[in-house]
Amino acid sequence: MALHVYNSLSRQKELFVPLHEGHVHMYVCGPTVYNDAHLGHGKTYVNFDVIVRYLRYLGYKVLYVQNITDVGHLLDSGEDRIIQGARRERMHPMQLAEMYTRRYFRDMDRLNVLRPDISPRASGHIPEMIDWIQMLIEKGYAYEVNGSVYFSVAKFKDYGKLSGRRLEELRAGARVEVLEEKRDPADFALWKKADPAHIMQWTSPWGRGYPGWHIECTVMSIKYLGQPFDIHGGGVENKFPHHECEIAQAEAATGKPFARYWLHNGMLMIRGEEMHKSLGNFITLEQAFERWDPMVIRFFILQGHYRSPLDVTDEALDAAGRGLQRLLGTVRTVRRRLASAAEGEAAPQVLEILEEGRRRFEESMDDDFGTPEAIAALFEMTREVNTWLNAERAPSKGSLQAIDDLYRRLAGDVLGVLPEKLEEEMGAGLATKLIQLLVDTRSKLRQAKQWELADTIRDELAELGIQLQDGPEGTTWTLL
Ligand SMILES: [Zn+2]
């Protein structure tokens, strides 16, 4: 089966065919850097990280862009989030944005989320946004009032095609207090006039001001990925109005389609409730890492499907931790035995188990990145590998290597839950060298006919589970 993805735009699963063979251009809405990242961000960016990783596993060259919003994302009160944060922390807005950008990447690194190829900052793309807004005004899709510019949604006939919302509903739901200057209550801001005291403002053809949040994503995605590009991702809570507005701005200006596949991930819930500061259930990633290993959080997130909501409970996370240990335990055993295994080809029985595991894993991932089923396939494979390992007294290097390789690819490269080096292993290299040192020392003692001391070394190694075998080629050892 080839890769199929659920496209929010068509509301169905579709065969994934990129615009340019072998290449995938992908954009995901990034964080607004005015606060620490929370568990919900963890879910979103782990979800899209695995999508990028799997596309790369399939052989695509992926160009992954994820913006940093450092201006223009307003609170419900109309205040810019960055400015609110800057006031709270008594910092310059750019200092605040820089600090939280660094903290965001630090948290994502701990979750083993690969960094995007490009992380464009909104504040660094103001001239491009002004150009785009001007293009919209020239084509009649936007208008200026009192130094602000609005997009006229009634002019764009496809408005609502992603979210399925109708213009009448939007007008009814629009807030009244900021609407006086808009021609239609459903219109949205492309550029906002700044009052003189506003710290973040730029010169534009309409006076001093700052861009709206939606225009950032349209302009930065197209700048780096072209139009159209393959995949646009983001949280389902941003489908409307944010993504709907991104489409309107992009397609109205050029007449070309914007993104070909829209992928939305489900929200994270805390014990069945949405996470909100006001509910007191707001958990930053930093706080979560004090309680759980970041890899356990990552594994927990992947045990749910990216499109589904995910409910966080202590019990579920603890269970995920035990599950991950089961997988890692097998990898640890394999690597430990690999250190002392005899040369030899992989056993056909092992190759069969691995082939079946790989096939089931890929089949699950090909079905709209089905990580829960892919993990189930890994567990099933792990059970069979364990059974085989228990029955085999001296598995060959080839067999153990083949097992380790497949875990590295599926659990490591794709799911990102297998660290490059497992803790115990870090000492394993040294342990192997120390054993060899004792074995060599014993051989020298035997050559010097110091039998008693040589036998003591052999016996004490045997007590540690290390068995020596003297042969014409010298002494070999195995770990029982
Ligand atoms: Zn966006």
Image (cartoon, rainbow, N blue to C red):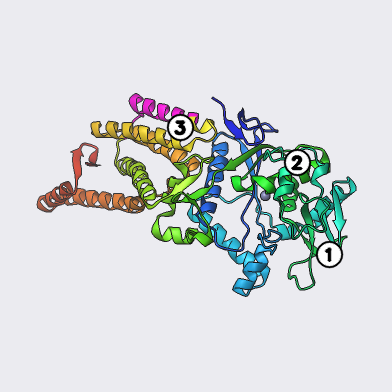
Q: Which residues are magenta?
A: 343-363
Residue type of the residue flagged with mark 3: Phe
Q: Residue at (64%, 64%) from the top-left corner?
A: 97
User: Which image quadrant is residue 31 in?
Assistant: bottom right
Check residue 243 in the rendering and tell me which mark sits there, or answer none: none
Would you say 37 lies left or right of 336 here?
right
Between 113 and 213, the one lying in front of the other is 213
Within 10 Å of disc 2 (Cα), the crowding (few <14, some 14-19, many 20+) is many
Residue 347 is one of the magenta-drawn residues: yes
Q: Position of residue 6 (x, y in %)?
A: 59, 33
Work out whether 261 lies above or below 417.
above
Residue type of the residue flagged with mark 1: Thr
The overriding secondary structure of the stretch rendered in magenta is helix
Residue type of the residue flagged with mark 2: Tyr
Check residue 361 in the rendering and tell me which mark sits there, or answer none: 3
Q: Which residue is mark 1?
A: 203
Residue 312 is one of the magenta-drawn residues: no
Check residue 159 in the rendering and tell me which mark sits there, or answer none: 2
Within 10 Å of disc 1 (Cα), the crowding (few <14, some 14-19, many 20+) is few
Q: Residue at (71%, 59%) from the top-left corner?
A: 72
Residue 224 is at least partly visible in this image: no
Q: CA distance from mark 2 to mark 3?
A: 39 Å
Between 35 and 142, the one lying in front of the other is 142
